[in-house]
Image: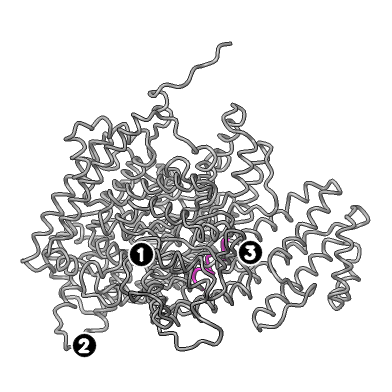
């Protein structure tokens, strides 16, 4: 038998060649069978909605809805324009509600059928990934000890944020979930025939209730409201998704002879609501503490519910099973510490040791919840001081089962409970704190001005001078403040109060309450040094000395947000880790350095091509620097829902990262409407989490080094440099056009978005002059999406691809699309954005709303759009967008037939609203109808912000 030589470059490229699944990028169905089932469900729900509309609003209104829908197929129809201009404001409200409700029903039905399609696959994502890992072990290309080392630090952490792009109320989402469950029940072929009328009546009832429910929030949500929304999702996942998902991971790993220890945490959750202070004055230290308290109250309640289920199941009797001495001794201690509980359970459960133990654990959890609520002292043995004590009790039970040879039970319900508890902890999620770098420097300016000692006032120092001052400060032992010191200045008081609140949270709830302090707008290392010095003042950090280790109760992460910062990311990380004091802080955090990468602002700054490419290159540089310094790199990807803000399929995005940049842990934001799209239904939520977890596992274990020769990689890099560079030039030429901002404000409802009450954070940065730089990335993307231009998701890509083709690199582009996951994912996301854009609809906004002196901007947009479509088709080898996905094209066309009337209505309402003089109170119904169209278009396009 002869051994094969190393693979050729051609073989390696062919092995990596993939044809992207367009349905994955559109979050839709791809099979004709599911499309037919989807259409049938949509017809049924549409009919029920029509009946509800007729019941509540009358037959004439239903007829008007159908007439508007029919006329809207021709956006320039004069009859439609006259009809909408003549509609009174209350009628416009009903029209907007009708089309919005339709999309909400379509969305949840599509989610259901997407899940039905995905659940029919023969192999789960985890099984496929673990199978490839098993093959690598068999081939000898992967060592078992290396695999176990990676698994020990494996951690996928979706972070639920409060960014205002989810326009649908939680109340409506709950109704939609019940509607999906009922539709699924009706479609189940195993359903008794007699159940049909009951389920059909229930479905009609739910649709009618949705029509009776207000889609708009009455008031703007507060951070605590946003936290409750996140907790609602987290509890749903903890209850219905996490246990079975982690059991599947255990099952698949067991197939290759690998067992995760009980303390392993391959999945956990993060949160930002209540901790993200950047630009949000409503997030105060008291709010942060209140949110952490709410999370722990909910998390402990969830654990108690899980224990209640376990108490019914674990009925093993000592008449038939043996238990360890350690468990018996533990029960004796519990009985002594909790005599009332023991007296209540011993008569019935005296011979059922696991039920006895769970009863004690349950009471201790309840007492822990009560202690945290009322701020009383910890009572050893009667409540839990921290999560580790709870975990020890659960592991003690499992160890007893294993010692008795009862592996089936030990690896069953008790292990599922352990895994779920470890994933969520006692607080469901770990909160991050984020603050703008300028706040910390303002605080230090207050402190240094108070004590003196600097030749130049701190506030006047440049970056280099501040780095020198702060590096010296970190290495020193002197405090900048003292016990009982007051009147430190407003900025210093704000920062120190926040640090004190973090300390209280850690003291009360444990080390996982808050883990990372993120510094937004990090320009240089002084921005990290500053927050470390402030944390030291609050006792959160001791930077140590050459002979004594540091202590750090929290970690610190820079957020690189602009292209310039991304370009310098590697150099900045090297400078950070080269400072002895800062390096000791990282060592105190387990040699883990977190870096957050900002997709939104970098895309708004330089366009999507430059943004995506610089983030990719930054990861390579960060990977190399982290290895040089012997630290584990934990990348935190700040992605939005739309392509213009880094959105797209999570699994594809993870597998598109540079080789070796993912080394076990990763954090990824889940924002706005993406949360409801991915996590409303339990089956789909399970699949989405599994895809991401499988991708993290595969990237960490199998994508540690590139097998392609350097000349191929250099060619691809050079080509992407061209694409990104020319794309950035085209994009910046547009955004620097003085007519762009007035065009954007006129052609989109961006100014109206702030009235929607969909987030607690203001849509514009404070203190600005109203220019593009003052507008946050979210409304920038949301606004363009509403008018169907969706500019941030594609502008400049056509110019970039054309420049590479003109440079003789067309063959290289096609090779990259076929065999480079990064480029294939990038271009697939752009293609999907182009397919959802509609410049004919956009032209209606321009004609009706944009002043003549800036309307010419649209010509530039049209020209680049046509160029981008042409160049994408060249690279992908298609004649039209989504050519290989006819089912998906039909699905998008169906949505367009209902989106068109909403766009026409929105255009009419914007013109009507803007015609009202500033000193006249606007018509409340017109404003309401307008906001409903914004809501409806967001529902129709889904990934809007």
Nearest to the eye among marks 1 and 3: give it. Answer: 1
Residue assigned mark 2: 921
Residues 369 and 566: in front is 566
**Spatial CA span between label 3 and label 2:** 51 Å
**Spatial CA span between label 1 and label 3:** 31 Å
Horizontal and vertical percent position of residue 397: 80, 57
Asked if one can make out residue 719 in the rendered structure from this viewpoint, the answer is yes
Residue assigned mark 3: 425
Horizontal and vertical percent position of residue 721: 27, 42
Q: Main secondary structure of the magenta part?
A: helix
Q: Which residue lies at the image location 17% right of the left edge and 66% below the top edge?
A: 741
Taking the image as shown, residue 95 lies to the left or right of residue 36, namely left
Residue assigned mark 1: 521
Q: Which residue lies at the image location 55% right of the left edge and 65% below the top edge?
A: 543
Horizontal and vertical percent position of residue 355: 82, 64
Label 2 environment density (alpha carbons within 10 Å; few <14, some 14–19, many ≥20): few
């Amino acid at each position: 038998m002869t051994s094969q030589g190393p693979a050729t470059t051609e073989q390696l490229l062919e092995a990596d060649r993939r044809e992207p699944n367009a349905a994955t990028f559109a979050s839709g169905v791809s099979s004709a069978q599911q499309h037919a089932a989807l259409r049938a469900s949509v017809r049924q729900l549409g009919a029920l909605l029509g009946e509800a509309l007729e019941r509540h609003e009358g037959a004439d209104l239903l007829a008007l809805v159908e007439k508007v829908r029919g006329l809207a197929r021709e956006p320039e129809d004069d009859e439609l324009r006259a009809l909408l201009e003549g509609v009174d404001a209350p009628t416009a409200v009903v029209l907007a509600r009708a089309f919005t409700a339709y999309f909400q029903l379509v969305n949840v039905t599509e989610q259901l059928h997407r899940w039905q399609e995905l659940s029919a696959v023969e192999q789960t994502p985890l099984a496929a990934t673990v199978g490839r890992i098993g093959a690598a072990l068999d081939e000898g290309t992967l060592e078992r000890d290396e695999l176990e080392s990676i698994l020990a630090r494996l951690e996928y952490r979706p972070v639920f944020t409060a960014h205002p792009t989810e326009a649908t109320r939680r109340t409506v989402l709950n109704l939609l979930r019940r509607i999906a469950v009922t539709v699924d029940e009706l479609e189940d072929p195993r359903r008794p025939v007699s159940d049909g009328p009951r389920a059909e009546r229930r479905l009609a009832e739910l649709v009618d209730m949705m029509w009776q429910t207000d889609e708009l929030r009455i008031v703007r949500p507060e951070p605590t409201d946003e936290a409750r929304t996140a907790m609602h999702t987290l509890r749903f996942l903890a209850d219905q998704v996490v246990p079975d998902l982690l059991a599947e991971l255990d099952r698949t790993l067991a197939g290759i002879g690998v067992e995760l220890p009980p303390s392993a945490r391959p999945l956990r959750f993060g949160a930002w609501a209540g901790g993200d202070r950047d630009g949000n004055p409503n997030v105060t230290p008291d709010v942060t503490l209140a949110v952490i308290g709410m999370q722990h109250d909910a998390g402990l309640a969830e654990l108690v519910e899980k224990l209640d289920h376990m108490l019914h199941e674990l009925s093993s009797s000592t008449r038939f099973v043996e238990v360890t001495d350690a468990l018996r001794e533990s029960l004796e201690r519990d009985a002594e510490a909790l005599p009332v509980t023991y007296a209540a359970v011993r008569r019935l459960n005296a011979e059922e040791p696991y039920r006895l133990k769970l009863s004690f654990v349950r009471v201790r959890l309840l007492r822990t919840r009560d202690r945290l609520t009322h701020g009383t002292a910890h009572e050893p043995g009667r409540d839990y001081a921290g999560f580790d004590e709870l975990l020890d009790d659960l592991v003690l039970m499992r160890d007893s089962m294993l010692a008795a040879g009862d592996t089936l039970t030990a690896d069953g319900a008790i292990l599922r409970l352990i895994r779920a508890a470890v994933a969520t902890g006692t607080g469901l999620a770990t909160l991050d704190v984020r603050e703008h770098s300028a706040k910390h420097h303002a605080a230090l300016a207050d402190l240094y001005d108070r004590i003196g000692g600097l030749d130049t006032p701190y506030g006047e120092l440049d970056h280099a001078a501040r780095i020198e001052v702060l590096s010296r400060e970190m290495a020193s032992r002197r405090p900048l403040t003292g016990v009982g010191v007051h009147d430190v200045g407003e900025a210093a008081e704000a920062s120190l109060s926040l640090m004190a609140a973090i300390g209280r949270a850690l003291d009360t709830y444990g080390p996982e309450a808050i883990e990372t302090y993120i510094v937004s707008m990090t320009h240089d290392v002084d921005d990290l040094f500053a927050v470390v010095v402030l944390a030291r003042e609050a006792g959160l950090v001791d930077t140590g000395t050459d002979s004594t280790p540091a202590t750090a109760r929290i970690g610190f992460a820079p957020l690189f947000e602009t292209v310039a910062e991304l370009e310098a990311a590697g150099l900045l990380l090297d400078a950070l880790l080269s400072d002895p004091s800062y390096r000791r802080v990282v060592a105190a955090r387990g040699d883990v350095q977190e870096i957050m990468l900002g997709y939104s602002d970098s895309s708004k700054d330089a366009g999507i091509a430059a943004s995506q490419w610089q983030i990719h290159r930054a990861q390579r540089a960060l990977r190399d620097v982290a290895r040089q310094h012997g630290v584990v790199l934990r990348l935190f990807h700040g992605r939005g829902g739309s392509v213009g803000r880094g959105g797209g399929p999570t699994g594809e995005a993870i597998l598109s990262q540079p080789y070796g940049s993912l080394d076990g842990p990763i954090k990824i934001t889940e924002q706005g409407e993406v949360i409801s799209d991915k996590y409303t239904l339990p089956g789909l939520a399970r699949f989405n989490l599994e895809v991401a977890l499988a991708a993290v596992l595969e990237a960490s274990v199998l994508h540690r080094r590139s097998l392609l020769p350097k000349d191929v990689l250099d060619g691809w890099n050079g080509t992407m440099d061209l694409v990104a560079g020319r794309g950035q030039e085209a994009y910046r030429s547009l955004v620097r056009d003085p007519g762009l901002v007035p065009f954007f404000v006129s052609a989109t409802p961006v100014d109206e978005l702030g009235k929607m009450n969909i987030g607690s954070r203001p849509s514009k940065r404070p203190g600005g002059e109203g220019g593009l730089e003052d507008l946050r990335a979210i409304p920038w993307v949301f606004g363009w999406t509403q008018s169907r231009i969706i500019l941030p998701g594609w502008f400049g890509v056509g110019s970039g691809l054309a420049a590479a083709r003109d440079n003789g690199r067309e063959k290289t582009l096609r090779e990259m699309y076929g065999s480079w996951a990064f480029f294939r994912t990038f271009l697939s996301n752009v293609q999907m954005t182009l397919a959802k854009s509609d410049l004919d609809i956009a032209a209606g906004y321009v004609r009706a709303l944009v002043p003549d002196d800036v309307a010419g901007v649209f010509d530039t947009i049209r020209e680049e759009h046509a160029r981008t479509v042409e160049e994408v088709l060249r690279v992908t080898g298609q004649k039209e967008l989504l050519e290989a996905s006819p089912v998906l094209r039909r699905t998008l066309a169906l949505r367009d037939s209902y989106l068109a009337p909403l766009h026409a209505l929105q255009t009419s309402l914007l013109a009507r609203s803007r015609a009202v003089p500033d000193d006249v109170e606007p018509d409340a119904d017109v404003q309401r109808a307008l906001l409903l169209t914004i809501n409806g278009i967001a529902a129709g396009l889904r990934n809007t912000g």
